[in-house]
Amino acid sequence: MKQIDNNDLSTNIVEQVQKIEQEYNKKVEIYSDYSEQEFLTLDQASHEINGDIVKVVITNEKYSEFVLAHELYHIALELSDEPSISCAVTSGKPDYDGRILAIANSIFETLEHISVLKSQKADGTYTDEIKEEFLKGIEAALTPKVSLDLANMRFYRTLIMFDGIIFSEHAQDDKWKDEFPTSYKYAEKLVKIAEANDLSSAFHFRRALVNALDAYNEIILSNGYEGLGYHEFLNVTPVLSERQLRLSLNQVYQVKHSSFKNRATGKDAFVLLGINDGQSVTTLDIDPGKVTPEFYKAFYQYKIIDVFEKEGVKYLTR
């Protein structure tokens, strides 16, 4: 792995880096770890944020400009006032937990791709050649060299196709509808949710994310599989008005004794669910032994802002 000097970067990339560093008080370090790539995919750059340092690693040398610009736009979104997902509970089954997070992150990133695509079209890093190469990778992903039962293959293809439709601007809709009709039907549901919302708005991004997770969960349930419990497993950053923050807790949220365990304590988890959408915004720091009817009665009367501050809940205002 080799660090890339800023002098070896294009003007466009340098400007992206400077914008991130200036707006968010971070230091961006870019490294190359090139390897032979059969296809262009959107995961050929990655990043970690540790304190003030943002470390970016790119693995595709031929299309380094594209993958680096792409990753920097994701980083800018992550650092901005955008809702995020987190998890503080566990089912006790690492594979199950990992699957939920992987699916949620996939849907989350595809929603971000609507904004990233606009930016990359504007700066010229998304070209006809890039679209063509990206679609080659999607086509390969749609026919993986692994053995999956029909339902799980459809679940997998739905996520691949969702991203493919969004980032290729519907370039292969007719082809995929013909080749993979059921997966396409599922993916189309997610696409409609994404495209019906103004994802530059934190409130609408959050709504689209929760609705897309719900839609994907319904796909799983409709095939006779166990649902993935997103509402209690994932915490999604709340987006509230100043007026709502001053309301008592019971007007907007309800405390749910979850079927999951608190990962930090190993004890029963209590999550705070929105009344309107049923989505958790935080896993509460509550001792299960102290949860009584009297506790609930008192807790529900606290103002939302006071609970958020006590529990360390990140929130956004609209």
Image (spheres, rainbow, N blue to C red):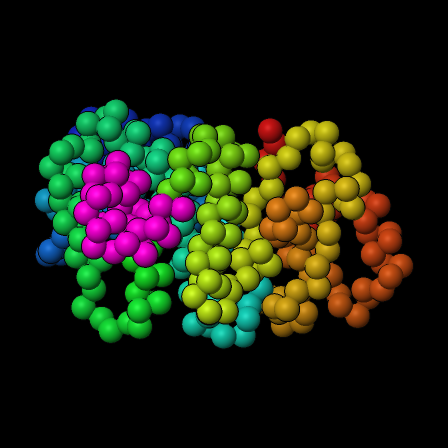
> Can residue 126 be seen in the rendering of this structure?
yes
Q: Residue at x 85, y 64 (%)?
A: 292
- The magenta stretch spans residue 174: yes
Q: Please tell me which residue lies in front, 71 or 273.
A: 273
Give the quadrant of residue 12: top left
Residue 303 % position (x, y): 78, 40
> Is residue 256 or residue 59 the one in the foreground?
256
The span picked out in magenta is 161-189
Q: In which quadrant will I find the C terminus? A: top right
- Using the rendered view, name the quadrant where residue 5 is placed: top left
Q: Is residue 165 above or below residue 158?
A: above
- Residue at the (77%, 36%) spot, across then down: 247
> Compared to 1, does 54 lie above or below?
above
x and y percent of residue 115 in the render? Answer: 36, 33
Q: Position of residue 17 (x, y in %)?
A: 31, 32
In the image, is 96 to the left or to the right of 118? Answer: right
Left or right position of 90 against 69: right
User: Which residue is painted at 73% across and 61% down in the image?
Assistant: 286
Left or right of 96 on screen, residue 55: left
Residue at point 53%, 58% (across, down): 230
The kind of secondary structure the magenta stretch mainly shows is: helix
Does 263 lie within the magenta span? Answer: no
